[in-house]
Image: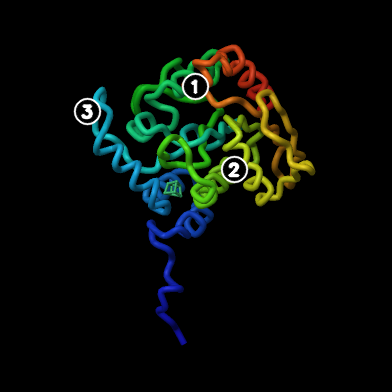
Amino acid sequence: MATSDAADRPPSADDTGFPAHRAPRCSDLGELDAQLIRCRACPRLVAWREQVAVEKRAAYADQAYWGRPVPGFGPQDAALAVVGLAPAAHGGNRTGRMFTGDPAGDFLVKALHTVGLASQPTSTAVGDGLTLRGVRLASPVHCAPPGNRPTPAERDTCRPWLAAELGLLGPGLRAVVVLGGFGWQALLPVLADAGRQLPVPRPKFGHGSRVVLPGTGDRAELSLFGCYHPSRRNVHTGRLTMPMLEEVFRTAAAAAGL
Ligand code: SF4
């Protein structure tokens, strides 16, 4: 007998189960991004991203904030992925593009441009002409969190979007640069679930760390690179310098065949 129980209905966009249900069903990154920007699965982050978009920062008072989940940015067949943390409240959450319109984005894109992976050294707004060569900017959490601190539960809820995005990049994905320990902790379970063989014990995050995972099936060997996040604090304290960031991307680009 056919049933119409609520349990049989697919989760709505504000259900915690929406990413796990929807992300694996997307057949390309365009569909994934279109579904992602509907997502309201994390009540705390939805409330924050929308509050920031209404209150705004004084310097951007005349701009319309995006105020929604921020999709990844870069080509569908990228050989190198960058896994960060989450969009900045007045950066990606304002402009609607990852690492765009905030100091961390400026620093990152300048480094990418220096090593030949970005068309220009600045990332200010959608439509500014920036294109990336062989690089996809991804994120373990797609909504701006208060204090730049998502909870582990929010990271886990958002994980299916990251898993699907990396899967859709295809077998040519050869390297991942992970910006900080949060991204590292988010990424390893995604790779394990995708059938990648991880070392035991699991490798720890560190700037300059490199882990090579063997290829599986038609998928190439995958090199992971740890790198400090280009946050304002890390840059201002000198923990992460431009030469350090450029060196990571230069090495990762070579590993990715770019
Ligand atoms: Fe959805 Fe991820 Fe945003 Fe949570 S953080 S609402 S799972 S897009």
* Residue 233 - label: 1
Give the amino acid at mark 2: Ala
| 51 sits left or right of 134 in the view | left
Whole-number angstrom distance, CA of label 1 to CA of label 2: 22 Å
Q: Which quarter of the rendering shows the C terminus?
A: top right
- Residue 234, how many percent across, how many down? 53, 21
Q: Position of residue 217 (x, y in %)?
A: 74, 47
Q: Which residue type does callout 3 highlight?
A: Ala
Q: Is residue 58 left or right of residue 160?
A: left
The residue located at (68%, 23%) in the rendering is: 208
Say if 67 sits above or below 193 in the image: above
Q: On the image, numbered disc 3 is attached to which residue?
A: 61
Q: Please give left or right for residue 36 compared with residue 239 in the image.
A: left
Depth check, mark 1 against mark 3: the one in front is 1
Q: Looking at the picture, tell me which residue is in the foreground, 54 or 27.
A: 54
SS type, badge 3: loop
In percent of the image, x 55 and y 26: which residue is there?
Answer: 229
The mark total stands at 3
Whole-Å distance between the Cαs marked 3 and 2?
34 Å
Q: Which residue is mark 2?
A: 186
Q: Amino acid at mark 1?
A: Arg
Of the image marks 1 and 2, the number of the one nearer the N terminus? 2
On the image, which quarter does residue 180 sit in?
top right
